[in-house]
């Protein structure tokens, strides 16, 4: 009977491996296609001759994109927004989630209800704009950082992780030994939250890196635009023939399609390189709640 079960397990494992392999292949296809087009000549891209491998290898489109000074400025702005915003978001979310996870917090249910209520009731676009304007954040870097820097859903995930993964008895023992709330949070709770901290860090980085809507709403200074807004403007200018005045209209039309693939690679590459460093913690952070539940 045991040998029969092992045989079934092997078949099941092989089926899962094959399905996951097919899924990975299908997922990678569009990424490989975009990458191949970005390294192909503009003529090959416009002919539709590029598949999963570059045709007539060329870096001309990359040279065109990085020749724009706004690209480097946009990269720097996005790095600032991502670094400051990620740190601020993690500090606010963890310092709010920790008290909500404490059984001895007075009014815990009220505060939890208040936070959850904001997920269903939203002031809307115009009231949000008026608030940002009243706080003096229009056309400033803070307009990209402050609005929406606390995700209530993420806060609830962190609270649930602390409640389910860190024994209350451990916290009680630390308090009995004279540990203050700040010391308890910093020395005991936070080190045990590394998996969920890595997950939330990745979420925050991806969110700020891809953010552009706030710049559409609250900014009009080109020097403050994030990378995504800069790339959007380049694509729009390229479609209307306003980028690179020295380029003829024929060559401009030829580069148009190729530039789109390059901007996708330029904007996505940093996140793709960053993810493998968080993968181990990312999987553990997502699974530990379900395993212990």
Image: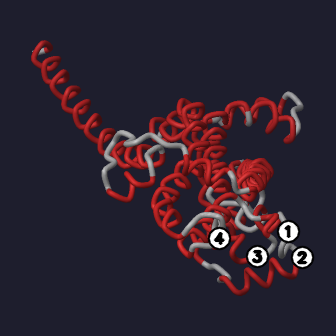
Decide if residue 47 is on the left or right side of residue 175. Answer: left
Decide which of 171, 66 is in the foreground and name it: 66
Colour style of the rendered protein structure: secondary structure
Query: Which label's residue is closer to the chain start, 1 or 4?
Result: 1
Query: Which secondary structure, mark 3?
Result: helix
Which residue does the numbered mark 1 point to in the structure image? 140
Horizontal placement of 222 versus 152: left or right?
right
Q: Secondary structure at mark 4?
A: helix
Q: Crowding at label 4, few (<14), some or many (≥20) Cα neighbours within 10 Å?
A: few
Residue 108: x and y in percent read 71, 59
Of callouts 3 and 1, the N-terminal one: 1
Q: Where in the figure is residue 217, as x and y percent of width and height?
A: 71, 77
Q: Secondary structure at mark 2?
A: loop
The residue pinned by badge 4 equals: 213
Nearer the N terminus, badge 2 or badge 4? 2
Q: CA distance from mark 1 to mark 4?
A: 14 Å
Closer to the camera in the image, 165 or 20: 20
Q: Looking at the picture, tell me which residue is in the foreground, 236 or 74.
A: 236
CB under 8 Å between callouts 2 and 1?
A: yes
**Quarter occupied by residue 111:** bottom right
Image quadrant assignment for residue 275: top right
Name the residue tied to disc 2: 136
Marks 4 and 3 close (CB-CB < 8 Å): no
Q: Is residue 246 above or below residue 63?
A: below
Q: Of marks 2 and 3, which one's residue comes earlier in the chain?
A: 2
Query: Which residue is depicted at the point 85% across and 28% down?
Result: 177
Q: Residues within 10 Å of mark 3 (few under 14, many from 20)?
A: some
Q: Residue at x 17, y 17 (%)?
A: 6
**Which residue in the protein does label 3 denote?**
218
Choose mark 2 or mark 1, whichever is in front. 1
């Amino acid at each position: 009977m045991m040998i029969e079960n092992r045989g079934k397990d092997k078949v099941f494992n092989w089926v899962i491996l094959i399905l996951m392999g097919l899924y990975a292949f299908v997922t990678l296809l569009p990424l490989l296609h975009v990458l191949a087009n970005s390294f192909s000549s503009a003529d090959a891209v416009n002919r539709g001759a590029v598949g999963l491998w570059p045709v007539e290898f060329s870096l001309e489109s990359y040279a065109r994109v990085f020749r724009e000074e706004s690209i480097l400025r946009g990269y720097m702005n996005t790095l600032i927004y991502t670094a400051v915003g990620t740190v601020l978001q993690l500090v606010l979310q963890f310092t709010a989630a920790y008290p909500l996870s404490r059984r001895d917090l007075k009014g815990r249910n009220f505060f939890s209800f208040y936070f959850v209520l904001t997920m269903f009731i939203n002031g809307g676009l115009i009231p949000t704009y008026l608030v940002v304007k009243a706080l003096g954040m229009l056309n400033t870097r803070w307009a990209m950082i402050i609005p929406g820097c606390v995700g209530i859903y993420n806060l609830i995930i962190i609270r649930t992780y602390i409640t389910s993964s860190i024994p209350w008895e451990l916290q009680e023992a630390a308090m009995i030994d004279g540990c203050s709330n700040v010391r308890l949070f910093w020395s005991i709770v936070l080190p045990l939250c590394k998996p969920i901290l890595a997950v939330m860090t990745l979420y925050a980085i991806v969110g700020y890196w891809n953010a552009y809507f706030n710049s559409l709403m609250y900014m009009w200074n080109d020097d403050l635009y994030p990378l995504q807004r800069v790339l959007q403007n380049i694509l729009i200018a390229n479609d209307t023939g306003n980028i690179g005045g020295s380029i003829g209209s024929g060559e401009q039309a030829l580069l148009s399609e190729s530039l789109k693939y390059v901007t996708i690679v330029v904007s996505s590459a940093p996140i793709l390189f960053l993810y493998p460093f968080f993968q181990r913690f990312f999987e553990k952070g997502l699974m530990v709640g379900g395993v212990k539940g």
